[in-house]
Image (cartoon, rainbow, N blue to C red):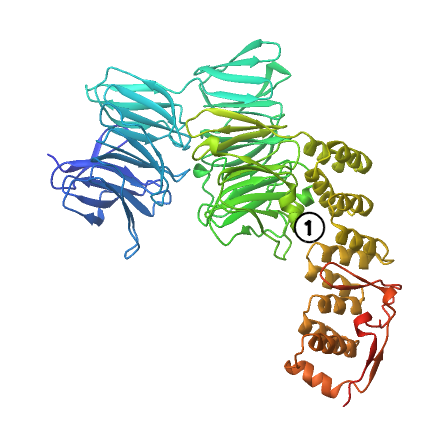
Amino acid sequence: MPGKFHLISKLGRIEKSVDAHCGAVLAGRWNYEGTALVTVGEDGQVKIWSKSGMLRSTLAQQGRPVYSVAWGPDSGKILYTSGKQLIIKPLQPNAKVLQWKAHDGLILKTDWNSVNDLILSAGEDCKYKVWDSYGRLLYSSQPHEYPITSVAWAVDGELFAVGSFHTLRLCGKTGWSYTLEKPNTGSIYNIAWSIDGTQLAGACGNGHVIFAHVVEQRWEWKNFEITLIKRRTMEVHNVINDAVDLLEFRDRVIKASLNYGHLVVSTSLQCYVFSVKNWNTPLIFDLKERTVSLILQAERHFLLVDGGGLYLYSYEGRLISSPKYPGMRTDILNAQTVSLSNDTLAVKDKADEKVIYIFEALSGKPLGDGKPLTHKTEIVEIALDQKGLTSERKIAFIDKNRDLYITSVKRFGKEQKIVKIGTMVQTLAWNDTSNILCGIQDTRFTVWYYPNTVYVDKDLLPKTLYENEASEFSKNPQIVHFIGNLVTIRRSDGSLTHLNISPYPAILHEYVSSSKWEDAVRLCRFAEDQTMWTCLAAMAFANKEMATAEIAYASIGEIDKVQYINSIKDLPSKESRMAHMLLFSGNSQEAETLLLQTGLIYQAIQVNINLYNWDRALELAVKHKTHVDTVLAYRQKFLEDFGRKETNKRFLQYAEGHCSHVSITQEASDWEVWQDQVWILRVTTVSDPPPPLPPPLAASIACTI
């Protein structure tokens, strides 16, 4: 009878039949945990059932048939069709419902992927479309000859299949078509992918079931090009000498990755590790029963992700670690939500998308104080830099607003600065050999030659960028990889395009990492590029190489900063120099803390006076019972310059009750002025003697009780 669904055991026996709808049941879907079933039918109802077939709720009821339904990634929302409309309805009562017109004809099929959070729809208007979970259109196909009767995502969200009359099409996740087949099947009404994403089955209008296998996938790295020519055979082509090798596998290939001189291949039962120097003797080890869904590589090791966990292996096949975190769901991880470097693993949490878990690669333990990195907005993509010291490891991420941020992964208690360095960023990638970051923001292709500049001298950051027009890449381009000086970008139509950037910044990074400062200066002089000098200025200051920093800042015309660097170089106390370097980078709180810890009380007070933090300056003076009169004198002169009277109660209290008479003079030669009229004292001893005031206050100032 129509209106029923059947619960069937693995052995094919009908365990239970349930009367679900008036009229035909048009679609049914299990949630990702397998604990609930949603059905829709000709009666226009959307119903939720337990796995034993008990009705939990009727989520929606409308006057027209519902042809297709899908669960949201967290099983907390339902997507269903209503004529030409798509509707997303949360399971929580009174939550906001999202509804939009998706097609010009009846919508026949829809699907929602748990990994990439993208939605597919297909309709009688002969088009298929890709949407994000907010209902924004990402891709719309050209009209086909016949209505689109089926669409389905592969489990990992990288591919989807489209079915129509005598038509089966394979597409990339952004909508472009890989291949088109014309089987003699009639309309393909439903498509189901295997769990490993290597094959699919289609229910055909002529009563047949069609099976298809994904082949001819390609991987490229430097001079090597690898193609999956059969389900168990790969072809390796070295484009330099035109040599060809065939790699045979016992089982079908499921996932592969080519990077850092190694090819890692997972089959249904084993993992193969090849070196590009020798294709004949791979290292082979057995896998657990679960299917590998993702392979990520770093220079020293690689990561396998399956439904059971995260597994970090060396290229010799040794299991290094298996990191875990609360509520871990590895089945929904992809290359945008996991990132690997030589010493660090970062994973974006799905339960709370504002959180990134950061692990030490070798031990699998949380990094630093064990607390995850938390952002104010949901994060959509993360990427770790690949080179340099562990203590300087940086992570870049794009949030829901398409803003690009960078921060340190080392976190010990205190809040680390999360700094925004870009807006409207669609995609990003770190270079494989140096810490250079590239991305596409709005209509510009941008390269951040030294992103760490934001922590050294953020005013210089715009001068360390390379920008180029990116409109040629059309809508939603994706950076595939950034190897050496070559950036590979996949356009929205699926074609690959390559961009070359200057080799000089990477060479500069190499010189700096090797402390070859003279070579770095010579390179900048040879390149005659202001961007290079700016990068060197920030790099030298970050590495406390003041002589080189002075040369570089002078070359870009930052004379005020050259003067300040000179004043820092002349300070006799190491702690004082460190504090002024922190001030230079805008870290006034850290500078004050350092000065207080080393007993340089007056300098800590002076830092706050220079920054007009009057309350903090007075607080320190009172707390340490020193230089209160000096703070009051500075404050009085400040108010006189602006023709104002004192209104701060604390200053009035101490002005009336603390000082009887102060006579302060100072020679102008003991002071230097910086760009914004901040007065910097040239300290002559470490003992921190009571200093006089600068020339503007070189007069007798009387405070009477």
How many marks do you count on the picture?
A: 1
How packed is label 1: few (under 14 Cα within 10 Å), some, or many (20 or more)? some
Asked whether residue 324 appears in the rendered view, the answer is no
In the image: residue 33, left or right of residue 27: right
Quadrant for the C terminus in the image:
bottom right
**Which amino acid type corresponds to the residue marked 1 in the rendered image?**
Asp
Residue 336, image x and y in percent? 49, 38
Q: Quadrant of residue 138?
A: top left
Asked whether residue 493 appears in the rendered view, the answer is yes
Residue 231, image x and y in percent? 43, 16
- Residue 25 vs residue 666, the one in the foreground: 666
Residue at the spot of label 1: 457
The residue at the point 67 percent across, 46 percent down is: 453
- Residue 303 vs residue 80, the one in the foreground: 80
Image: 459 above or below 339:
below
- Residue 628 vs residue 465, the one in the foreground: 465
Image: 168 above or below 327:
above
Residue 594, image x and y in percent? 75, 61
In the image: residue 693, left or right of residue 344: right
Which residue is the extreme one toward the bottom?
705
Image: 609 above or below 77:
below
Residue 433, image x and y in percent? 66, 31
Q: Quadrant of residue 537?
A: top right
Q: Secondary structure at mark 1?
A: loop
Quadrant for the N terminus in the image:
top left
The residue at the point 87 percent across, 58 percent down is: 572
Q: Quadrant of residue 467?
A: top right
